[in-house]
Image (spheres, helix red, strand yellow):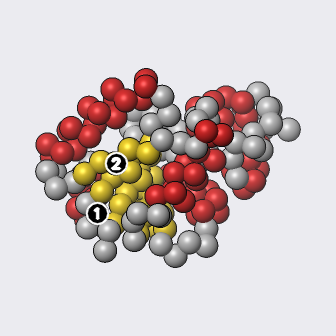
Amino acid sequence: MRIAIYAGSFDPITRGHEDLILRSLEFVDRLIVAVATNSSKQPLFAADERVELIREAVGGHERIEVKSFNGLLVEFAARENARLLIRGLRAVSDFEYEYQMALMNRHLSPRLETVYMVPSLDTTYISASLVREIARYGGDVSSLVHPAVATALRAKTGAR
């Protein structure tokens, strides 16, 4: 069974994330969407809230599992018997960081491979940080996120 992990902070999950999640099912048997707890970031949503929003956004797919994790991604991957990491690349500016992370993950776990996916053209410009900023100022995020996420953003930010 080909098990892959798509890890990120997903604060919040966007249509771009959803696109990569669903498209990755074309070449894996099981996908674990792993919500990372990053001590250097101050997330808008708690990890359990992010897990629930992801489940709502991509629910109904028996081959997708959503979990949160702490610590090293390579250790989480080993516990889950995953041999593949899925990462998204929106722009050239993402590449340097992603390349460095892939090399370090390979150093820590030589059998773990990283596969990069480019987003669909209509989601390339979407980032979670931009979505948070738009929501914070009461902007319309309905085309950028699942309806449940838009509702949660309005509740969390106090926007209209």
- Residue 107: which quarter of the image? top left
Q: Name the quarter where the N terminus is drawn.
A: bottom left
Camera-side residue of 130 and 94: 94
Left or right, 58 with reference to 96: right
Which amino acid type is shown beneath numbered disc 1? Ala
Q: Residues within 10 Å of mark 2 (few under 14, many from 20)?
A: few
Left or right, 1 with reference to 147: left
Which amino acid type is shown beneath numbered disc 2? Val
Give residue 108's mark. none
Q: Which residue is mark 1?
A: 82
Can residue 30 be seen by looking at this rendering? yes
Can residue 37 be seen by looking at this rendering? no
Q: Earlier in the sequence, mark 2 or mark 1?
A: 1
- Residue 104: which quarter of the image? top left
Q: Name the quarter where the C terminus is drawn.
A: top right
> How far, Cα to Cα, is label 2 from label 1?
13 Å
Q: Position of residue 143 (x, y in %)?
A: 75, 43
Give the residue drawn at x 77%, y 44%.
142
Q: Position of residue 92 (x, y in %)?
A: 43, 25
Q: Which residue is mark 2?
A: 115
**Secondary structure under the numbered disc 1 in the rendered image:** loop
